[in-house]
Amino acid sequence: MKKLSYILIIFSLFGCVNNSLIENPTVPVNLISQEKMADIIYDMTLISVAKGVNKSILENNGIIPEEYIFKKHSIDSTIFAKNNEYYSFDLKIYQSIYDEVKIKLQKNKKSINDSIDIIRKLSGELSKKLIKESKINKISVDTIKFDSITKINLINTN
């Protein structure tokens, strides 16, 4: 996340420089669409967050974040850098790309929060059912067979 923040700060500083000092960048040979650029930056943000949470999981699974993203989107670091430079020159376009990334992140957050709420509700119901059934049948926890998260079969050992 720090790297992404530094990149954004650098590009913001370039945006503040007098445009007469900077030539318009040429259109890259391998121009990436704005939508795909948003997808790449979105993935970079997720990987950056994942690295911040538990970098060792990525390392233990042999995942090198930047390589993974570039391979996923069939690009290399040079293509990304040239496209990033091209889009960052026009701050309105660059802002629209980041607005799209923000929207995706907000949808992702909502989806995750909804999933967590469902799991909490199901686990609460499951706990209540287990307590009720264990009192009725006097069974131990090791005799419970889980078929799915919403369905439990209790095996009576009596």
Image: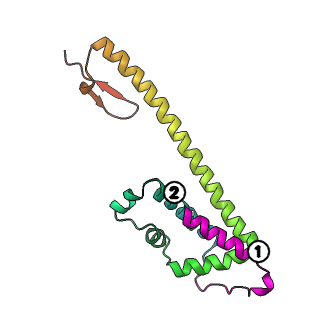
> Badge 2 is on which residue?
49
Residue 116 position (above or below residue 28): above
Residue 97 lies, in percent from the top left, at 67, 66
Residue range in magenta is: 1-30
Q: Secondary structure at mark 2?
A: helix
**Circle on res. 16:** 1
Looking at the image, the residue that sits furthest to the top is: 136
Residue at 66 percent of width and 85 percent of height: 27
Q: How is the image coloured?
A: rainbow
**Foreground pick, 5 / 94:** 5
User: Can residue 114 be spotted in the picture?
Assistant: yes
Amino acid type, label 2: Val
Residue 58: image quadrant is: bottom left
Residue at 63 percent of width and 60 percent of height: 101
Residue 79: image quadrant is: bottom right
Q: Residues within 10 Å of mark 2 (few under 14, many from 20)?
A: some
Residue 56 lies, in percent from the top left, at 38, 58
Q: Is residue 21 magenta?
A: yes
Residue at 41 percent of width and 68 percent of height: 64
Residue 152 lies, in percent from the top left, at 34, 27
Residue 157 position (above or below residue 120): above
Amino acid type, label 1: Cys
